[in-house]
Image (cartoon, rainbow, N blue to C red):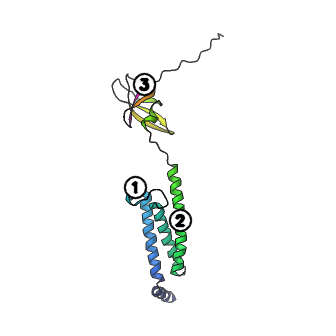
């Protein structure tokens, strides 16, 4: 019976209502954080880039603020003190989210290559290139294998080494066979 009376007292002094509001703030922040991480780009119109005011950072702050304040009210703290503790926890959490998202975005590899990056690169014919037709070549750029459609002045068989001479589009190139270098020979007769 004491528990029910305590609940009524907290309802009338406002701490239960404040706790509920903090809980709603935490849930909304958590949902926004989940959406910003899973459906990256859906809220780009409201995003302020990758800086400290990115949607991920703001959502992390809001979520941690709400849940920490809710926990503090539940532990018996006054509402203003719970809000201050929640704000401090939110700042730490938001800073951590900013740092982690910056770290993750910096670690993302970029396989995008420009036309200037491909000219002169050697690769191998994956799908035979017929004279006047289209084949496929594979090259290694930034440590990753990239397959490109390829044309050539003459037929080039599968497995042949080629050098990219020109980029036609972002996914197709013109190639020429790489001349085989002569094998080193030893003039000494044994």
- In which quadrant is the C terminus drawn? top right
Residues at marks 1 and 3, CA–CA distance in whole angstroms: 41 Å
Q: Label 3 near label 1: C-beta < 8 Å? A: no
Q: Where does the magenta region start and end?
A: 168-188
Q: Which residue is mark 1?
A: 41
Q: Which residue is mark 3?
A: 176
Earlier sequence position, callout 1 versus callout 3: 1
Horizontal arrangement in the rendering, residue 99 relative to residue 151 (left or right)? right
Who's the residue at 33% across and 25% down the image? 132
Residues at marks 3 and 2, CA–CA distance in whole angstroms: 55 Å
Query: Taking the image as drawn, is residue 82 in sight?
Result: yes
Q: Helix, strand, or loop for circle 1?
A: loop
Horizontal arrangement in the rendering, residue 43 relative to residue 161 (left or right)? left
Who's the residue at 54% across and 69% down the image? 89
Above or below residue 117? Residue 162 is above
Earlier sequence position, callout 3 versus callout 2: 2
Q: What secondary structure predominates along the stretch shown in magenta?
A: loop
Q: Which residue appears farthest toward the right when viewing the image?
A: 190
Who's the residue at 46% across and 79% down the image? 18
Q: Helix, strand, or loop for circle 2?
A: helix
Earlier sequence position, callout 1 versus callout 2: 1
Q: Callout 2: few (<14), some (14-19), or many (20+) C-alpha neighbours within 10 Å?
A: many
Q: Helix, strand, or loop for circle 3?
A: strand
Q: Which residue is mark 2?
A: 93
Image coordinates of residue 126 in percent, x first then y, are 42, 31
In magenta segment, residue 180: yes
């Amino acid at each position: 019976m004491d528990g029910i009376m305590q609940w009524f007292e907290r309802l009338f002094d406002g701490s239960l209502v404040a706790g509920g509001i903090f809980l709603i703030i935490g849930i909304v922040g958590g949902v926004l954080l989940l959406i910003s991480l899973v459906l990256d780009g859906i809220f780009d119109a409201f995003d302020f880039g990758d800086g400290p005011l990115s949607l991920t950072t703001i959502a992390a702050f809001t979520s941690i603020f709400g849940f920490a304040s809710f926990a503090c009210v539940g532990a018996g703290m006054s509402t203003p003190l719970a809000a201050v503790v929640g704000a401090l926890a939110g700042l730490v959490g938001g800073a951590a989210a900013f740092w982690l998202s910056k770290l993750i975005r910096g670690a993302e590899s970029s396989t995008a290559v420009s036309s200037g990056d491909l000219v002169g690169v050697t690769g191998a014919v994956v799908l035979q290139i017929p004279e006047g037709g289209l084949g496929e070549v594979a090259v290694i750029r930034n440590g990753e294998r990239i397959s490109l459609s390829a044309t050539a002045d003459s037929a080039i068989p599968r497995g042949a080494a080629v050098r990219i001479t020109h980029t036609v589009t972002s996914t197709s190139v013109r190639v020429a066979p790489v001349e085989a270098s002569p094998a080193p020979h030893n003039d000494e007769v044994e």
